[in-house]
Image (spheres, grey):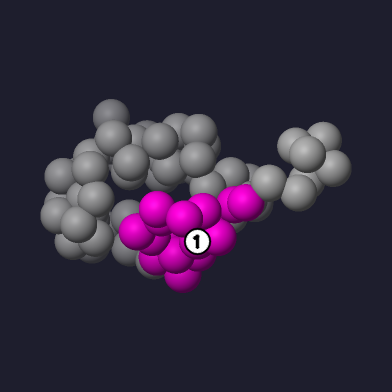
């Protein structure tokens, strides 16, 4: 299933609180300086800080983050 890319991703996952558009917003707003902490993002989207950390570290939502400069995004939180 995984090899053939047939698993649910992103907002297709049943319990997902975020959408693909939310992930783009998080990245863009981080790069523009609007968000300055995992906590601020987590509170804004009503998710845990760990969810945001997983996105930034490209452990989740990789189908969205793979084409983005996540090294730069990650450096803004260190």
Residue at (44% x, 65% y) in the render: 19
Could you say where residue 58 lies in the image, as x and y percent from the top left? 51, 37
Q: Is 15 within the magenta?
A: yes
Question: Looking at the image, which residue is at 24% across and 50% down?
Answer: 47
Residue 24 in sight here: no
Badge 1 element: helix
- Mark 1 crowdedness (10 Å alpha carbons): few <14, some 14-19, many ≥20: some
Is residue 64 shown left or right of residue 60? right
Q: Is residue 20 left or right of residue 73?
A: right
Instruction: State the extent of the magenta-drawn residues as a range.
Output: 8-24
**Res 64 quadrant in image:** bottom right
Closer-to-camera residue (54/29)? 54
The residue labelled by disc 1 is 11
Furthest residue to the top? 78
Q: Name the residue located 55 percent from the left edge and 60 percent from the top edge.
A: 12
Specify the quadrant that holds the C terminus: top left
Quadrant position of the N terminus in the picture: top right
* Residue 28 against residue 9 in the figure, above or below: below
């Amino acid at each position: 299933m995984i090899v053939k890319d047939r698993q649910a991703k992103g907002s297709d996952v049943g319990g997902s609180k975020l959408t693909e558009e939310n992930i783009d917003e998080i990245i863009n707003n981080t790069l523009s300086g609007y968000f300055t902490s995992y906590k601020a993002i987590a509170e804004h989207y009503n998710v845990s800080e760990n969810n945001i950390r997983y996105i930034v570290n490209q452990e989740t939502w990789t189908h969205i983050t793979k084409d983005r400069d996540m090294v730069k995004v990650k450096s803004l939180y260190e």
